[in-house]
Image (cartoon, rainbow, N blue to C red):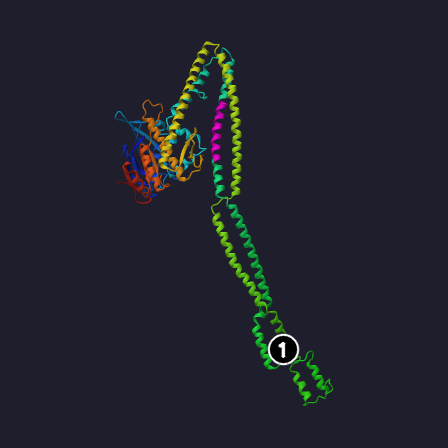
């Protein structure tokens, strides 16, 4: 198949009519279309699949240009259309898909109409149309949708394909590869001749037997039909188990990688818990010390702050000579009694104006109720006591505040350590949870193994019983001439089936070996480094280390290696298809397809881009690349004379993009 040109009308960013032609020259078979991210590369890549199959990978399935949509008046209609002109099997086709969009009376866009797909072609110089009822069938003949993804793909799809070709991919992939390599005719013939389907040739002969000669024939036919039905169910179950086993193996491998990548998380968790306990202790110590400060300050704070005042007051009292002049337990009434009696308790006479009288009168100033002396005495004692009690408070508070300041430093330090650990843990998974999931997958794997072994055992038993029925029925049919004739025809059909199966197995094995050689040749061009590829009978691909210090086994691949495998594999399939297609008296029915790639080189370094650019044009009949400007200059340099057509995306705004041919 050769892509010639594409015409787009109001398809997403491509407003109005936009045309693009592709390189079709055998020597200049590369088309490069360059643009920045968001300029329309992915949209153009999706235009192919929308035109051919009516589907895109966009979340928004509305493909009408947004600018056109905004300009639509109420109760108006417009059409989105993509035309793709191509040549297939020597015939020129034009694939046309249209979709009508309308607005309601308020100008709001209504649900779009279903797409309409038309195919026209040239026959004897005249333009013909494929009937509407046959367009989907004809498209499947040209390029089935399940095969298209191997020729129309983007960077994200490459990653998906990388996982698909690893161990455990689906049967669909192997069938697709066989189809690309031209083995479908064999498988269809084998299915038609000898399968256990009701409408196969062999089963058809069974239904023609005449049971009138012996009623046991009907019993055997019914038994064989039941056995065949159960064998079909077992085959489907085994295929399903194989697919689930593959996915289970993939999940176990993924979990093994995650466990390895996150194995330090447990250690980090323990360290974080330890530091968090340290934080709790620091907070507790801070709370305790703060409580000590408050209690200490509540008890002695006023005394400590009043020390200077008390000292100054005591000094003033000393200077006033009023300290200690009071007489303990003496009241003014006692002095008045003595003066009135006229005689002191010591027997000395007290007369008005004499020295004794004068002294007693002075004493009245310092004893209750005029107790200045006692008050001063009490105050002095209180000051001494409070001063002594507050004497050590400063040192004690100083020690506590030192611990509080150390808390701040320690707390910040521990928080920093926790933050460092959390930064390491960020993005890491819990190993315990991963181990639990792994055990679940391991258990599922054991269950699948047991189920498979049981089914295989049952299949063997059924085949034995079926074989006996087949033998007994054949013996009975040989007793009747008409049945004998049918049995002979059936034997010929079985012989043809067995012969064709042998040829198919030989051809399939030979084709697979050729494919492995072709893929390895291309892989070595793209990715040097002591690796090779192995393809098993189910078309699983493994990357093998080539005898590194005696080691030779399958290995995990990096992103660049995986994508290199994809390029090598697809290029190898194309190369083999081209070789088969050019062979005279070819047995395999093959068709060569183009490679249409959206941003395929983003994961590679400059060296790898060079090798890929040199390899792909050699093996593919046609290469169309949508590429970023930054990669495009490098790619264009290495593609050199192979580039036949160059375009750039001309982005006007977010809604409108055009093409500029360079």
In this view, the residue in front, 478 or 527, is 527
Q: Residue at x 41, y 40 (%)?
A: 559
Q: In which quarter of the image is residue 622?
A: top left
Crowd around label 1: few <14 · some 14–19 · many ≥20 (10 Å): some
Q: In which quarter of the image is residue 169?
A: top left
Residue 294 appearing in the image: yes
In what quadrant of the picture does the C terminus appear? top left
Residue 486 vertical placement versus 299 (above, below): above
Q: Quadrant of residue 25?
A: top left
In this view, the residue in front, 249 or 514, is 514
Percent coordinates x, y for residue 550 in the rendering? 45, 35
In what quadrant of the picture does the N terminus appear? top left
In this view, the residue in front, 404 or 606, is 606
Residue 360 vertical placement versus 5 (above, below): below
Residue 173 vertical placement versus 194 (above, below): below
Residue 78 appearing in the image: no
Q: Is the magenta stretch mostly helix, strand or loop?
A: helix
Percent coordinates x, y for residue 57 in the rendering? 38, 37
Secondary structure state at the residue bearing disc 1: helix
Q: Magenta region: which residues? A: 229-249
Q: Name the residue under label 1.
A: 376
> How many numbered tags mark residues here?
1
Q: Residue 45 vs residue 353: left or right?
A: left
Q: Residue at x 55, y 51 (%)?
A: 274
């Amino acid at each position: 198949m050769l892509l010639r040109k594409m015409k787009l009308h109001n398809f997403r960013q491509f407003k109005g009519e936009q045309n693009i032609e592709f390189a079709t020259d055998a020597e200049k078979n590369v088309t490069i279309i360059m643009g920045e991210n968001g300029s329309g590369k992915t949209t153009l890549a999706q235009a192919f699949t929308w035109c051919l199959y009516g589907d895109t990978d966009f979340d928004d399935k509305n493909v009408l240009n947004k600018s056109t949509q905004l300009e639509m008046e109420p109760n108006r209609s417009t059409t989105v259309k993509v035309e793709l002109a191509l040549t297939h099997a020597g015939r020129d086709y034009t694939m046309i898909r249209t979709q009508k969009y309308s607005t309601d009376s308020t100008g709001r866009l209504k649900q779009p109409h279903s797409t309409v797909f038309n195919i026209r072609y040239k026959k004897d110089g005249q333009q013909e149309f494929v009937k509407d009822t046959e367009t989907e069938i004809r498209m499947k003949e040209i390029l089935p949708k399940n095969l298209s993804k191997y020729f129309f793909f983007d960077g994200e799809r490459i990653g998906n394909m990388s996982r698909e070709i690893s161990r455990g991919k689906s049967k669909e992939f192997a069938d697709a590869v066989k189809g690309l390599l031209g083995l479908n005719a064999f498988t269809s013939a084998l299915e038609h001749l000898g399968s256990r389907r009701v409408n196969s040739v062999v089963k058809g002969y069974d239904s023609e037997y005449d049971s009138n000669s012996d009623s046991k024939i009907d019993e055997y036919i019914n038994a064989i039909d039941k056995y065949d039905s159960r064998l079909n169910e077992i085959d489907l179950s085994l295929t399903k188990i194989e697919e689930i086993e593959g996915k289970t193996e993939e999940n176990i491998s993924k979990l093994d990688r995650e466990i390895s990548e996150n194995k330090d998380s447990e250690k980090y968790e323990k360290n974080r818990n330890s530091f968090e306990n340290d934080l709790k202790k620091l907070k507790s110590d801070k709370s305790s010390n703060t409580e000590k400060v408050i209690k200490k300050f509540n008890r002695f704070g006023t005394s400590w702050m009043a020390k200077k005042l008390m000292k100054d007051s005591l000094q003033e009292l000393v200077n006033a000579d009023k300290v200690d002049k009071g007489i303990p337990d003496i009241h003014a009434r006692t002095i008045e009694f003595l003066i009135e009696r006229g005689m002191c308790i010591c027997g000395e006479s007290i007369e008005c104006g004499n020295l004794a009288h004068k002294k007693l009168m002075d004493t009245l100033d310092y004893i209750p109720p005029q107790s200045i002396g006692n008050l001063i005495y009490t105050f002095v004692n209180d000051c001494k006591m409070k001063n002594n009690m507050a004497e050590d408070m400063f040192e004690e508070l100083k020690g506590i505040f030192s611990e509080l300041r150390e808390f701040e430093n320690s707390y910040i330090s521990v928080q920093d350590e926790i933050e460092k650990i959390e930064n390491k843990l960020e993005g890491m998974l819990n190993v315990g949870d991963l181990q639990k999931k792994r055990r679940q997958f391991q258990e599922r794997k054991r269950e699948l193994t047991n189920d498979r072994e049981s089914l295989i055992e049952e299949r063997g038993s059924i085949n034995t019983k079926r074989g006996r029925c087949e033998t007994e029925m054949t013996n009975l049919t040989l007793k009747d001439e008409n049945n004998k004739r049918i049995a002979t025809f059936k034997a010929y059909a079985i012989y043809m089936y067995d012969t064709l199966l042998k040829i198919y197995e030989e051809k399939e094995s030979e084709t697979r070996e050729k494919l492995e050689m072709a893929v390895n040749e291309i892989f070595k061009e793209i990715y040097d480094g002591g690796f090779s590829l192995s393809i098993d009978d189910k078309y699983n691909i493994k990357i093998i280390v080539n005898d590194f210090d005696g080691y030779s086994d399958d290995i995990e691949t990096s992103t660049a290696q995986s994508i290199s495998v994809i390029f090598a594999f697809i290029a190898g399939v194309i190369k083999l298809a081209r070789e088969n297609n050019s062979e005279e008296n070819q047995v395999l029915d093959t068709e060569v397809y183009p490679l249409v790639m959206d941003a395929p080189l983003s994961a590679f370094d400059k060296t790898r881009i060079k090798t890929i650019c040199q390899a792909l044009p050699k093996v593919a009949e046609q290469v169309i690349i949508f590429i970023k400007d930054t990669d495009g200059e490098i790619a264009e340099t290495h593609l050199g004379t192979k580039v036949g057509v160059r375009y750039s995306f001309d982005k006007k705004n977010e809604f409108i993009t055009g093409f500029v041919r360079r």
